[in-house]
Each structure stands twice: as C-alpha cells, then as structure tokens.
Image (cartoon, coloured by chain):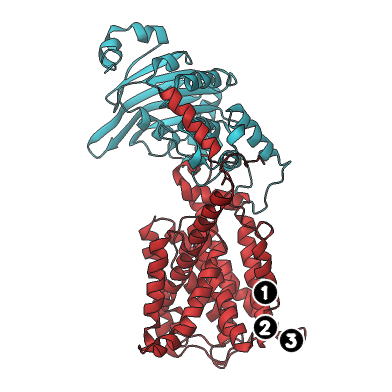
Chain colours: A cyan, B red
Amino acid sequence: MDRVADRLSALGSTAALELRGVTRMFGALAALTDVTITVRPGERRAVLGSNGAGKTTLFNCVTGDFLPTSGTIRFFGEDITAFPPHERIRRGLRRTYQISALFLGLTVRDNVYLACRGVSRARFSMLRPGVNDALMQATERLIEAVHLTSVRDQLVSELAHGQQRQLEIALALAGAPRFILFDEPAAGLSPTERRELVAILTSLPPHIGYIIIEHDMDVALRVVESVTMMHNGRIFKEGAPHEIESDPEVQELYLGGGHE
Amino acid sequence: MSLIQEARAREEMLAGSVVTQPAAWSVTEQPWAWAVAALLLIMPLIANGFFLIEIFGTTLILGTIALSLMFLAGYGGMVSLMQLTIAGFAGYMVAVFGVSGNANISLGWPWWLATPMALVLAVLFGTLGGALAVRTEGIYTIMITLAIGAAFYYFTNQNWAIFNGHTGINTIATPHFLGVDWRMDIAFYYLTLAVAALCYFAVLYLSRAPFGLALQGVRDNPRRMAALGFNVNAHRIAAYAFAALIAGMAGVLQVWNYRQISPGSVAVERCIDILIVAVVGGISRPVGPYIGAFIFVILRTFALDFLVKVGLDGNRFRLLIGLGFLAIVFWSSDGVIGLYERWRKRTRQETRPPAGGHGHG
C-alpha cells in the first residue's frame, strides 16, 4: 500500500526536496519546529537567518546526520526520512560543511578520489586504480574545475584556508549530484575567492539545484532565485531575493541587526 | 589585509612543500630497504638456529600480529587489543582441527585442511568482534576489544571440552610437504619470512587501493565519509576482517613454532604486548610493527642477562621494556618511525634548499 503511494507520489511530484512538518528536538529545545519547504529540481535557494535559527540543523536532518523528531523528508519523491546518510548521498544528494570536513592526512587528489569513489561502485575494491581509470580522470577534471591542480599532490592539512574551502566544494560535486546543500561556503574567504566561488556556483549545470546558507548577502543573493528566512527554528518568510531584501520585518530582524 | 595574508600564506605553502607524498615508503624508494630484504633472505647463512627462530622468526611472527593492529589503528583509527586473541584463536583452531597429543580433543584433520579452517574461523571471530567494536569510538573501542581478549583468556582457562583448560593443547603436529619438514629451523624461517612479506606488501598495496584509502578517510573524518556515500561501519568491519586474516596467519605460525598452545599464550598482558610492539615501532607505516617487534624480542631475550650482569633481578626485564616504551613514546609520538622521519627531515633541510623540488604526479 505505502509502496504504491510512494511510487505514485514520485510520479506526480516535481519537488527535488520536500520537507513536511519537520521538527527536531534536542532535549526540551526545539532546533526546528514544523518546517515545511518544497524545492523544485534545479531551483537555487538561500536559507538566511541569524545564528541559532536552525539552518545547519535543517541541513543535518536532510542529509541524515540527525533524524527529525517528527515530519517527513522526500528527495525526488522518495521518502528518505529514515535513510542513513550514505543512502541519501548515493541518490544524488550532496553537502558541504561550514567548518571544512576534509581528510587532512590525505592528499588533495586522494580526497577528491574518495568523493568520486563514494558515489560509484566498488567502494571496497582492493585493486589500485590505474592512471586511465575513469574515476581517476573524473578526479583530475574535478580538481581542475576548482582550480587546485597546482596543489593536487599536497596533504590537505598543508593547504591554505581558501584552498580547503574550494576542496570542500569539489567533494560535493563528485559523481552526478542532483541537489547540493552548501553550508556557508564563503566563510573566511577573501574577496577574490568569493568572486571565484560565485563563478563556480553560477556555472553549475542548470539541472543541479541547491540550498545555500550564507551570511554574505553579496554572495547569497547573486546565486539564488528564491530565499527562505528562518528564525528560532521556524520558517519566517519565503520569497524572491529582492522581496526579502526590501521586507521591513526581515530588515529589522536580520539585516539591520547583522552589522556589528 | 586578509587578501595579502592569504597570498603570503599560499606562497609559504608552496615554498615549503618539499614533503608531499606521505605514503611513498616502498622498497623501491628506500635503498636501504633492499639491504634489509637481502639480509633477511641470506639470514640462514649468517645466523645459527637460535637466532634464526628465537630472534628473527619470533620477530616476524610478532611483527605480523602487530601489523594487523597497525592496519586497524594507523589506517582506520581503531585501536584493537584483540589482535593477539584472534591469532591465539587461530592457533587453538589449528590444534583442535589438526593433529596433537590430545587425541580426545583434536579432530586429526591434515594440516592443509585444518589451516584454512582455522583462518576462516579466525576471520569470523575478528569480524564478529569488529562488528561489536565499531559501535564505539576511541577509548571504548580499546575497552571492548580488551574485554573480548580477557573473556577469551578466561574461557580457554575454564573450557575443557575444546580448549583443554589451563593445560592447553600440546605436541601439535607441524606440516610436512614437498618432502620438507617445515618445522626445521631454516624451512620454518623462510616460511615465516614469506608469510610476513606477503602480509607486509598486502597492507602496503592496500593502503593506496580504494579500500585502504577509504579506511584512511574513515579515520580522518567518518562523518564526511558517510556524506560521500560510504557506509562507514561496513568499511570498519571489513577492515577488522582483513586484519583478522593477517593476525590469524601469524597465529598459525606461532602455534607451529611452539607446537603447543595454552591460555598463557592468549593472556591479557600478551594482548597489551602487541600494542606496545606496534606503538614502539610506529603505527603510521607497515614497517613500524616489525621494527617494534625486533626491539621487543631483543629486549625480552637479552634484558634478563643484562640485568643479572649489572646485579639486578633478571625477572625485571619487563621494567626495561616499560622504560624503553616510555622513552620512545615520550620522545616521539610515532615510535621509531617518527624518530627516523624527524632525523631524515633534519638532514634533508641541511643538505637541500627548501624551495623547488616539488613535482606533479
């Protein structure tokens, strides 16, 4: 019964990501309260809100790092609410982290190779890949796409902060992503690096949608077509970037108070 | 301001990048490793039976058990204290399925049947233990694997039907094939050397294969590995299975070496010895456990005579081992390997200008 319903809704649904009534409690504290969001395939959306608004918790619920206390999450029509993280990733979901989550003891190339391997088959392969291995070539292309070719043999722990942020993005682009969650990708980047980041985000293939958490409005509002404002774990307002920017309530709550 | 800082940091980064590839510790790149390999091969010409078996054979067996711990701890970040227990279990299984003096227990299978059986069961043991251990992290992994080791020790002590209680199993038959008695000193030495080399190169090879790389990814950041599509716990359990195979092979050699096995062979302090061996040698590279095992065996064999000579109680040789352990861990976080690497870095900085030198690919 449920199976059939699932498949029917998958056929009829056009949403890439659909959250319904998602609530996440940490003890008595509600980090997310009744969050309902629908994102179309290929849609690019910013999630704004002050610290503690529940933005990263939202990401963690979508990727499965935490299970929601209640509510359902659908990814391209499929109910993934109880899936372990790796099963969600294998279905085309990706994410980056606010604080770089890289493999510091490995080289740039190994990091990217692992990302490519993780969403392909033979993850347990005991045979070393050859130079002509398709995944190795995909790895090289990805390294080039994020401008890290000159440091590809260096240990990640030796990279500059900006380079680590670029690698962070590369790991989320491996394989065939359908939807990406970017958690403050511009954090700690220089103005030049921010411009590069905007270029990378805007040049993503149009079928790849994403949600971006970003405090820098210059970055956030240039790379999205819709904005969700969060406050105290709830959805506060949704709309186009210019509507949100000029909304007096938003101004008071977030944009006004943000410049300290 | 931050732009300039960033640029400067990057320049420094590029200039300082002499040491880049961490995993290049193969025979081909270390000329002295050829010398060690050659020396090990011609050892029977140089060393007498005592040195061949008691020093080098024992070192290779102990080093291989510690190698299985190095694989788990160095690549997987999982410190397992049950590796000796797995080796001991494999040894017991050789005795139980094979031929021994305890005919009421041993099933009398030929060695070529009993040995694979022992290895399969050892892998099963390691996999089940691993499946329990991967639910925990850090110190709790140590505790749970130590608990498994302790439980097995007490079980062998009290179980008479299979393990023959505290007397253990004696006069275990060793293999004869190709017209060779493989328990003769020289033959056994080469057998041990072959198994150790096989395990060593397997681990070395695996460290750059997808399975080994993924394991290092799990070590560095398990959460991110899951976010890249890896089933982290499945990877950890598979690593335990592989490590159990290595430990099991060493355990089979161990029981062929002593021809007997008893609870004393799987005692808790033996389990901890393996940790000491691995840490003293260094757990960042597969060669570390063998260096640690050599130091351990030398100390264990000669510390007694040395202590007696300087007028101390010979039974205090463990004190000497303990002090050596303390000194090495104090001076280097990565055992002898760490000391060597620091020395090499220093000499390199003296002989070579720091810039340039960095090639791609």
Q: What element carries label 2?
A: helix
Q: Which mark is residue B39?
A: 1
The residue that disc 3 covers is B180
Of all chains, the one bearing label 1 is B
Q: Which of B343 and A218 is in front in this view?
A: B343
Is B334 placed above or below A53 here? below
- Sequence-first tag of 2 and 3: 2
- Do labels 2 and 1 touch, CB within 8 Å? yes
Q: Which is nearer the eye, A203 or A243?
A: A203
| Mark closer to the observer (1, 3) | 1
Seen at 58% across and 40% down, the residue is B355
> Do the residues indicated by labels 2 and 1 lie within the same chain of the protein?
yes
Name the residue type under label 3. Val
Q: Residue B46 carries which label?
A: 2
- Viewport quadrant of the C terminus of chain B: top right
Distance between mark 2 and mark 1 Cα atoms: 9 Å
Q: Where is residue A151 in the image (x, y as percent from the top left)?
A: 58, 36
Query: Can you say which quadrant of the picture contains the N terminus of chain B?
Result: top left
- Quarter of the image for residue B143 reads bottom left
Q: Position of residue A204 (x, y in %)?
A: 57, 21
Q: Which residue lies furthest to the left in this view?
A: A28
Report in which chain the residue with disc 2 lies: B
Residue A253 percent location from the top left of the image: 26, 15
